[in-house]
Amino acid sequence: MMLLAMILTTAVGWTQPAPVYSVGLSLAVQPQPADEPKTPPAEPKPATEPTPAEPSCPLTSPKVPSAAPTPPPAASETPPEIKPGAPITTPEALLSALEVADADMRTIQADCRYDKIFEIAGDEQVRWGKLYYEDQTKPGEARMRRFAASFEQLRIGRRIEKEPVVYVFDGTMLIETRPTRKEMVRSRVAREGEAIDPLRIGEGPLPLPIGQKRDDILARFEATLLPADADLPDIREKAAFSALVAGAYQLRLSPKPGIKELREFADIRLWYRESGGRLLPVAAKTTNKTGDLSIFWLDKVQVNASIEPHVWASETPGEGWSVVERNLADPEGR
């Protein structure tokens, strides 16, 4: 959705299909300035993989047989106008709470579903996987946050395929890995010595403004607090999405005119729920100027659980891989 759609909102991959689909997580990072079941055959055929079943739960990845098993900041002060535990009744109050929601929050991981719906073509693509976030900030240094998303399954219309793809973003480099194809794309998205915040809307890949300055958001957006079930996306699993966000705070962000990095956005919706004394993301929906939707569903959110080191792997996996290097931080970069 931008270059978003943006890396969670917000386009490396997942473009509008022509006759042939180009699939992938719409992870646009803003560059720095400048049907029916098939009847089984009478006789077994070798090298044929069963068709995956439709997932029983919208956030559960469909089961696909695989050849082999897969191996496995300092707290800031609460803004004076918001008291801890006070009810949140205004968008300003919610943004103030989100500004300090990442206090002592070092990691987040969750089950993730990502929907991409193309308004003009009427096509829908869905991926299921895991989302990871880590704050690597060290005392006295500039803030460093990174995220990774690992997807195993892809649904196009009603066809479900095994299509693994992994994204790792460290604030400087976005690495896209497709193990089945042995392909890796390494894109530099920030100049040397600079870093992009992966959670800042319009700059990073995930439209989840946790730890973002309230005044920064209000300077770029008109903010509105809505009921959890207001204007839900008209998708196949709308009832399941409604159940997911029930009881959550819904924040609508409408970009103010004249802001370059937000020019692709028409509307942004964010859902947060209070859990264990902190606000955690539940879902996000962005709509671009052509009406295309990107929807993130998050479930089983864990805070400060350890993340396996292999999640952040960014080196070329081995021989026989195709590696493409791109420089998106330079307007002339390739």
Image (tube, rainbow, N blue to C red):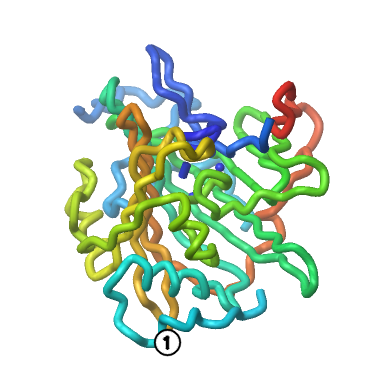
What residue do we see at 30% from left, 26% from top?
123
Quadrant, the C terminus: top right
What residue do we see at 21% from left, 50% from top?
232
Quadrant, the N terminus: top left
Q: Residue 22: x and y, percent?
A: 48, 23
Q: Which of the 4 image quarters holds residue 142?
A: bottom right
Q: Residue 31: x and y, percent?
A: 64, 35
| Residue 176 left/right relative to 5 | right
Amino acid type of disc 1?
Pro
**Residue under numbered circle 1:** 84
Question: Toward the viewer: 38 or 311?
Answer: 311
Q: Residue 279: x and y, percent?
A: 42, 73
Q: Which of the 4 image quarters holds residue 143?
A: bottom right
Asked whether residue 78 appears in the rendered view, the answer is: yes
What residue do we see at 47% from left, 54% from top?
219
Q: Residue 144: x and y, percent?
A: 70, 60
Q: In terms of secondary structure, where does tag 1 sit?
A: loop
What residue do we see at 50% from left, 34% from top?
2
Asked whether residue 60 appears in the rendered view, the answer is: no
